[in-house]
Image (spheres, rainbow, N blue to C red):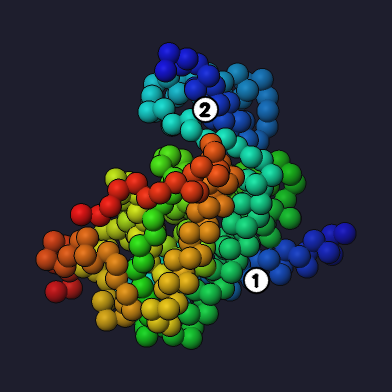
């Protein structure tokens, strides 16, 4: 925790890059001004440290991003089709998906991926019990909802295997707490 | 070369516009707030990405880079917005319950604990 600067450096670099990209002409003034502004912003607005419990596996991250884009196309098509075909009579369901990971970043990643996964949208995140409540559309019946749950579990496994500290341990970990 | 990129841009822009139109159809026709979010979160995002891509093909690189940033921030912020709006919709009874096949959240947030719907 006392190793402060390494945590801030990526944020400064990212903001600096963003500044230069937004100006789109890297003159000396833009570059030095960007550095000053990003350092000022990072030190003026202190963010809580993101838990560093992740290991980035670049190949799997690439595969994840590729899958994300493919999913986005599929889900846009399926929602558009549902809008035209079913409209007001569309059927939906809310399913509970247990999370196996307990790191903020992994939960964020999983819910992002879930949102672009065809037909699903995160409604509620229960961090204490490690549960995700997902709204699914369109569904034909209860068996459809069960299939959806299985698919979401696989999506989470993909996030954990790309970013989890120990992919194998994370995926075989038992659920954290029982619901009362 | 320019003819190829013109055709590619035209296809991308038109497909993007089509998805935006279908989003509007979804927003109009779906029964409740969360179903409409599905349309807004997915079809709209894809429509925007396709339009940005189509526009980027026509621009010199230094002007195309900010468009990449637009796409990136769209992808980062949409899940957050939909989750917050969806969560609020559920807690204010804005869901059209007859169209739900299954509701596993109901036992955690029972109807009497939710705020009454504005529509009554």
Q: Which mark is residue A11?
A: 2
Residue at horizontal 64 percent and vertical 40 percent from the top: A57
B17 to the left or right of A128: right
Check the picture and name the quadrant holding the C terminus of chain A. Answer: bottom left
The chain to which mark 1 is attached is B
Tell me what residue is drawn at x 63 percent, y 35 percent.
Answer: A21
Q: Is residue A34 above or below residue A100?
A: above
Q: Which image quarter is the N terminus of chain A in?
A: top left
Q: Chain of mark 2?
A: A
Q: Residue at x 46, y 16 (%)?
A: A4
Q: In this orientation, which residue lies closer to the viewer: A32 or A101?
A: A101
Q: Position of residue A134 (x, y in %)?
A: 38, 63
Q: Secondary structure at mark 2?
A: helix
- Which is nearer the eye, A79 or A65? A65
Vertical side of A142 occupied by A95: above or below: above
Q: Nearer the viewer, residue B58 or A133?
A: A133
> Element under label 1?
helix
| Residue A167, position as x, y percentages in the image | 55, 43
Q: Mark 1 and mark 2 in contact (Cβ < 8 Å)?
A: no
- Residue A37: tell me if it is visible: no
Height in image: A143 above or below B13? Answer: below
Tell me if residue A64 can be seen.
yes
Tell me, for residue B14, which label it has, or none: 1
Residue lying at 53% horizontally and 52% vertically, measured from the top left: A157
Q: Select label 2 or label 1 by which is in front.
A: 2
* Image quadrant assignment for residue A73: bottom right
Q: Residue furthest left?
A: B112
């Amino acid at each position: 925790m006392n190793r402060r600067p390494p945590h801030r450096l990526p944020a400064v670099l990212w903001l600096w890059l963003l500044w230069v990209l937004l100006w789109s002409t890297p003159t000396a003034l833009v570059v030095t001004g960007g550095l000053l502004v990003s350092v000022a912003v990072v030190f003026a607005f202190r963010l809580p440290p993101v838990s560093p419990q992740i290991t980035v596996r670049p190949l799997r991250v690439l595969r994840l991003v590729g899958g994300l884009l493919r999913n986005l196309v599929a889900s846009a098509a399926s929602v558009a089709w549902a809008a035209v075909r079913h409209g007001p009579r569309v059927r939906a369901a809310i399913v509970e998906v247990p999370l196996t990971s307990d790191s903020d970043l992994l939960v964020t990643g999983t819910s992002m991926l879930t949102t672009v996964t065809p037909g699903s949208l995160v409604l509620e995140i229960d961090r204490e019990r490690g549960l995700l409540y997902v709204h699914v559309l369109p569904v034909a019946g209860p068996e459809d909802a069960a299939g959806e749950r299985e698919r979401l579990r696989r999506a989470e496994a993909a996030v954990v295997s790309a970013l989890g500290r120990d992919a194998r341990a994370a995926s075989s970990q038992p659920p954290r707490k029982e619901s009362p | 070369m320019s003819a190829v990129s013109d055709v590619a841009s035209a296809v991308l822009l038109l497909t993007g516009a089509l998805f935006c139109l279908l989003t509007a159809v979804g927003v109009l026709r779906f029964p409740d707030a969360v179903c409409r979010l599905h349309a807004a979160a997915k079809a709209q995002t894809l429509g925007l990405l396709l339009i940005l891509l189509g526009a980027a093909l026509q621009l010199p690189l230094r002007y195309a880079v900010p468009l990449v940033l637009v796409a990136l921030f769209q992808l980062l912020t949409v899940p957050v917005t939909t989750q917050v709006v969806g969560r609020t919709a559920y807690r204010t009874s804005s869901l059209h319950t007859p169209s739900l096949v299954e509701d596993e959240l109901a036992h955690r947030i029972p109807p009497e604990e939710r705020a009454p719907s504005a529509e009554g």
